[in-house]
Amino acid sequence: MAKSKRRYYLLALMGIASVPGLVLYSLVMLGFNIGGIVLASLSVLTLSWIGWEAIGIFRSLSDFNSRFEDGSNVHFHVPQGSVLERIATKMNHYIKKQDDSRQQMQEQIEALDIQVQLSQRQARNTEAIIQSIHDAVIVTDCFNRVIVANSKASELFDFDLDKAQYKQINELLGVEKVAAMIMTAISSKTHHRRNDLEIEIDGQLKFYNSTFSSITDESGEIVGVVSVFHDISREKEVSRMKNEFVSHVSHELKTPLASITAYAEMLVDGEAQDDESREQFLSIIQTQAQRLNRLIEDILNISRIESGLVKVKKDRASVAMLIRDSVEMIKSYAAEKSISVIEPNSVVYDQVNVDKDMISQVIINLLSNAVKYNKPGGTVSISVEVLEDLISVKVTDSGVGIPSDEIGHVFDKFYRVSSNDKVAKGTGLGLNLVKQIVEKVHGGRVFVESVEGEGSTFGFELPLCATEETAVI
Ligand code: ADP
């Protein structure tokens, strides 16, 4: 900057310095006469004026140059009345226009920058929303390319989420029928489609409710599809269990009812000739009616507990007392099969906060099964153990036992061990009721151990009451 300024001044000085030379040259040439002097004076004045103007121009140019390089307030400054004034005004006007449009462009760039940042944030938000959805989501464009997918989708269809974007949907998804459904949703021009899907994952059949919703632009043209896959396997399982329960219940109710109806009809028709036959028929009717009653009672109890409608009346109780009362009730039944019942050892503290009727029902169910599935002359022994803040009750029998592959099912509703079917009749609801009462109503735990042909141990654990009182046995 300083260098170019110096150059302008040098030029101006050279111009001024050349003036005396020119005057001298003019005087010599014109022979020093009056006309020559006047002419020489005029030349001097003219040249001085030109020199002065030149200095002004050099100064303006130099000033402009430094402002231009600084980028600050760029315009020409020329002395008023200078020959360059008009040009400078025009130049300044042009520079101002350039400045204004540069300013406008700068503002537009800043606005665009903000827009880009906003769209990036919106895209990140949309992505975060899609990622947080519990269902599998895939968004595709009108060329069937993946625009966005969430981790649930990558887990379900087993693809690499990081490499999924812009891939063709049929190349990405291993499940051909799903890719076909998405592609049909684009081509069919329907705005909303629903399909039930069955997909095998790790050898397990899973059920999905899939929806394909089209994305449209301002002109209503379909430009993409949002595909959502909602796992309904649990709902399917619950509905299957409900159906199974209803068909089991109706089947179980039908059997004793059919028996009652048949024997009652025979009695009405006078088919029982003697007192002994009549008594036998009446006894069957009574047994079947009792069975029906038990069945209905068990079904109602289970469904009341499951639905949370059961009325629970919890009181402090001694486990030993509850066992003693239950053993009393079962003794005559055990005696019929010559089975000896061994009562429990006593423990120091056995207080629990329970619904006495319900826990008595649990103990009676376990004891009656231990007798029912026992061999004549066998034993049933009851033991009680305190494990820190829990009390554990075990009923061990020397009965037929349960095959190892069926043990895991004995607490299921209506489950009856097929090999024990001939040993005793039953509904397959007793142990389920035991489980519901112990686990759902009292927060305890049931358990079973069994060896086929040798016997079984069924039991339950309940939380002990935190108290200083000791048990009364
Ligand atoms: P059930 O009315 O059939 O006795 P439960 O729910 O009480 O129904 O028992 C389910 C099944 O578990 C029974 O059908 C029986 O085969 C088996 N089971 C229960 N208790 C015993 C036991 N102590 N010994 C052997 N098998 C048992």
Image (cartoon, grey):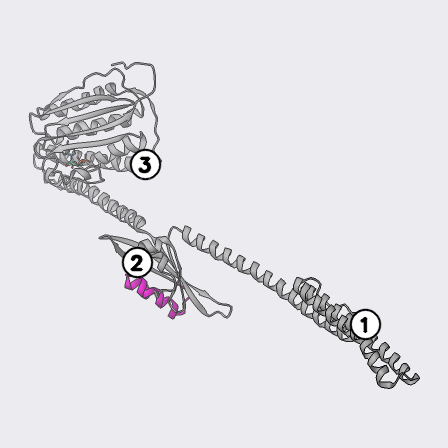
**Whether the residue under disc 2 has CB within 8 Å of ligand 1:** no
- Residue 428 in view (yes/no): yes
SS class, disc 3: helix
Say which residue label 2 marks.
197
**Whether the residue under disc 3 has CB within 8 Å of ligand 1:** no
Q: In the rendered view of the protein, which quadrant contains the C terminus?
A: top left
Can you give x and y, in whole percent of width and height, for residue 209 in the image? 34, 56
- Give the spatial CA distance, label 2 vs label 1: 95 Å
Which stretch is magenta?
169-192
Say which residue label 3 marks.
304
Q: Please report the residue visible at 26 percent of the width from the left and 49 percent of the height from the top.
A: 240
- Give the spatial CA distance, label 3 vs label 2: 34 Å
Q: How many labels does the image show?
A: 3
- Does the magenta portion include 186? yes
Can you give x and y, in whole percent of width and height, for residue 156 in the image? 31, 54
- Give the spatial CA distance, label 1 vs label 3: 114 Å
Point out the tag, 2 or 1, that comes first from the N-terminus: 1
SS class, disc 1: helix
* Numbered circle sitting on residue 439: none
Vertically, is 21 above or below 144?
below
Residue 167 horizontal side relative to residue 320, left or right: right
* Amino acid at dot 2: Leu
Q: Quadrant of residue 166 in the image?
A: bottom left
* Amino acid at dot 1: Trp
* Figure quadrant, ligand 1: top left
Point out the tag, 3 or 2, that comes first from the N-terminus: 2
Vertically, is 150 above or below 435?
below
- Does the magenta portion include 384? no
Say which residue label 1 marks.
52
